[in-house]
Image (cartoon, helix red, strand yellow):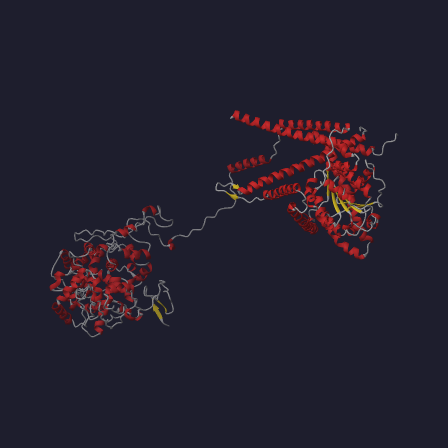
Amino acid sequence: MPNLPPDLIPGLVAFLFTLCIFSYLIGDNPLFRIAVYIFVGVAAGYVASVAFRQVIWPDLLFPMIAGPFTQKALLTIPLILSVLLLTKVSPRLTQMGMPTMALLVGVSAAVAVGGAVSGTLFPQIGATINMFDSRSVTSAAQWIGMIVNGAWILAGVATTLVYFHFGARRASDGSVHRFGLIELIAFIGGIFIAITLGVLFAGVYSAALTAFIDRFHFLGTLFGLH
Amino acid sequence: MSTIKCPVCGEVNPANAEFCQNCMSRLEPLTGPLKGEDAPIQPGQLPTKKVTAELEPILPQWLRDAREKARQSASEDAADSSLSSQNAAPPAPAAPDLLAGLASQGGEEEADVPDWLVSLTGSVPSKKKKNEPDESQQVKWVELGGHEDSEDVAPSIAATQTPSEIPVENTPPSWMAPQEPVPEKDELADWLSRAGRSSASPPGGGGESVQSPEPAAPTPFFASSPEDADWLKNLESQPFGSASGGESPSASGLSEDRNPQRGPAPASPPAGDLPDWLSKLPAQQAAPDSPPPSSGAEPRVPSQVDRFQGGPPAQSEPAAPAEIPDWLKAFGQAPVTPATPESSSAEVPDWLKAASAQSGGGLPQKGSPPAPSPAQDSGQTPVVSETPDWLAGLKPAEPQSPTPPPETIASAFTSQEVSQASASTPAFTEAPPATGDNADAIFGSLQVPDWLTVAGPKSTDQSSSDSNVPPQPAETGETIAPAELPSWVKAMRPVESALPASPAPGTESSMEEAGGPLAGLQDVLPAGPSFLPTSKPKAYSIKLNATNEHQTQAKLLEQILAAETAPIPMRATPAMMSQRVLRWALGVLMFLMVGGVLLAGTQIFALPARVPDDQTEMAISAMEKIPAGAPVLAVFDYEPSLSGEMQTVAAPYLSRLLLLKHPRLTILSSSPTGPALAEQLMTSLQSGSLPVQGYQPGRQYVDLGYLPGGLAGVYEFAQDPAMAMPLAADGSQAWQTAPLQGVTHFSDFASIILLTDSPESGRVWIEQAGPLRGNASLVIVSSSQAGPMFMPYVASGQVNGLINGLNDASKVEQANGQAGLARRYWDAYSLGSLLAAVMIILGGLWSLVSGLQARRAEREKS
């Protein structure tokens, strides 16, 4: 038996699965589905194993077994909540998991709101305002650039916010239209939003293209085509 | 226990009762008693004379002229007053000033006075009765017809008899007293005189009868004259007898209210222009439609008769104030005098009692002798010769109409009254007729209109023959034409279109109104609610009664609904085939071009130039500021699907960092797959273009593994890293390893490098951990799809640098001075991006052209 590179079998498996995914080019087919099912199953199994090995066992079960009494007592609460959360599997007992879900949702919402306000809203507003800060400007060109850039960003932010203003009046003929000036500003904001979505689409395409190239590179490396 | 008698039905009720137990009439008037000048005059009290000269301006011109003439003929007045003194009557209360002087015009001045006025006021002073309260009382119940029904009905019942039977004792008011000297005769007087002659022989015949004096010159009740008003002329032209069978508006209204079962009225009511007090005369005249005394038809006897017998005695009506005529006073007064049951005979008017006494018969009261008349009580010679003209006029009028049908009588009285009447014997049914001298004595001074006396016997004969025969016109040869309704009464007649086409269910059909304003209309007046039959709502079954047709339709509906929900197989269209072909073509093109360029290893496309102060240079600058050997936190937060891109992008930056700064690397994953991807990256770094050697787990770097909890876990880790992640991925105490030495807080890391492909997870780290990072730099290595979303944070300074996709990775490689995967992928990446752009543009043009062609084709078709 000749010596096979150690990455040959994993490479072949990866190649097969890559072809299965590429088979979606001809449409939905069993190969694609098999590859997807396997990926999902493996990912779930891996996540479960990671969760158990890195979270449940070291942080919950092991302390409950070998930890001090105080730690055990403190871990009783998350243990009960975790058990109640497991009742979500059964439709009859799904209501018992509601307290845990409520705790999770409530805490997550509170943390998200606080972080959004302190980490995004206020800093972004301040950044938009500081675009016109001329203290760091040393030349006329910088000053002009600062003004143009700040005005552009300010216009984009303002018009985009106005775009999401949906207040309107009902006209005499029954049609509903926004106020004329609001409509104009919202139109400009729509342009900014369209540019942003185009950038996002280009980024998604770029990411997918890079992944596609990486797969091609893997295949070339596997088969020594480079 | 004190009792109170109902003024309406005579029922004895407890004193505290508010309404009659029998007829539910109010026993006590709501209005308080009259006080002061308006207080009623008590019996025996003389009214105070009051000057009403101030009312003279409002009198009619003819009245003022008459008054003026009266003043001029003072001497004649003195003569008339002497005649009145012969009757030994007490001085009558002064005539109302309103009519003052009119009485004095009798005699010589008669010709100047209108006849009707003469009839009204032509009573000579001698006719003045000593019993003034009785006079006023009579006037009132003549005018109102409602003072005391017993008194009101008494003359009516008496009118059914011959005039000679009428025992009259009370003198009529002076203004109604007939005038003895009748200087002239008109046509009306003629037929009145004939009627008087014909009524000389009473139908009763034997027994003591009061022979009514034949009036030599009977004065009509209303004498016509050219100056008479129209309504008086109408009154003349329409004898009261014509209204006997019909109903006056008031009477009909009364009967309609009381009894819905109304019989046909033979004649129309008199003219509505008459004053109320006059219009009530024919209404009262309708009351004599009671059956003749001999018939003994108790059920048809109105209750008034019964009350006349057993009702309370009519007390003397207090005299009205002198300044207002009694007939005007009577409009505002409807005195209800409570009667005591002991004096049942007192209900009979005194004049009637006196007549009965004189005739020797007396009233056939059961067990009660005839009550003495007031005149007898006073010891004065009773004067029974003065019968009120109105009574005499009413009396003969009744005979003109025979006994009306029962419905007519029933219309005038309530059923209750009728029942009461049926339970008692009429007061006058057995009264002996007054004949002979007694009658003369009684009616000596009675000026009975001849037209009434003439009609009396005839009608009496007819009534005795057949009581059910409808009233016939008098045989005087004059056709009694029904009075025309006033225009306003006609306007109030209901429109025939508004009347129900068919009678109400349960009611007898076709009750046509024969008289009154509603004459000729059918079913105008609804029957009483008590007569309507009660019907229960029809019960419907809740069971579905579906026929075969209904079931068939239901099945059809079910089929339609089933067809709506049934899936319809989609037919493959050529467009789908073209799209699949296009997809294949694009796939093959992409495979060939990208794969060919990648496999060929060309470097056609130049790398992007480095731009100062851009996010990549900021990230490199931030890395340059990291002290050597400082703890650095690398967060792996991307999915395996984008691991190829992320490793290509992150490898140059991490290789540069590890090679240049030799940081103590701490790896943390906020994704479950992160630890494996981190391990793969670290492995790939060792075999990359810039191989990183010497980094061993647990020595140079530590893998904390998966951080659970999402954003809450991130927040917790930022608050207390050791508490959140006490163990490493391999289960060892992470914070006791060399890479984490001296690190107790999140801000103790020199730099945080976030590798993410999701803007959401990257934002979580920015929001939750950014404020707690202290002086540590935050650099994001992101996929191309998430990089644009981090640009604002880079611009705001919340992120110190950004490595976005393959473009920025190529810049880092340029900075490293060593080509890597980014440069290898760049041509394929650039060609693939260009191909995509070209295909998008071509697709847009194709869509535009196809759209224009389609519109052109539609235009051609249209």
Name, please, the residue furthest toward the bottom: B379
Give the vertical position of B181 relative to B618 (above or below): below
User: Is residue B712 positioned above or below B549 on the image?
Assistant: below
Q: In this view, does A222 lie to the left or right of B184?
A: right
Q: Is residue B768 left or right of residue B74?
A: right
Q: Is residue B484 visible?
A: yes
View extreme (top): residue? B860
Furthest residue to the front?
A139
Of residues B118 and B513, the one drawn nearer to the viewer in this rendering: B118
Q: Which of B299 and A10 is in front in this view?
A: A10
- How many discs mark residues in the rendered view? 0
- Quarter of the picture holding the N terminus of chain B: bottom left
Residue B463's spot in the image, x, y percent?
A: 22, 56
Q: Nearer the viewer, residue B215 or B704?
A: B704
In the picture shown, does residue B222 fall above or below B784? below
Which residue lies at the image location 57% right of the left edge and 41% below the top edge? A185
Q: Can residue B444 be seen in this view?
A: no
Quarter of the rendering containing residue B317:
bottom left
Between B450 and B818, the one nearer to me in the picture = B818
At which x and y percent is residue A34? 74, 34
* Location of residue A30 in the rendering, given as x and y in whole percent from the top left corner: 72, 32
Q: Where is residue B242? Give x, y as percent.
A: 22, 54
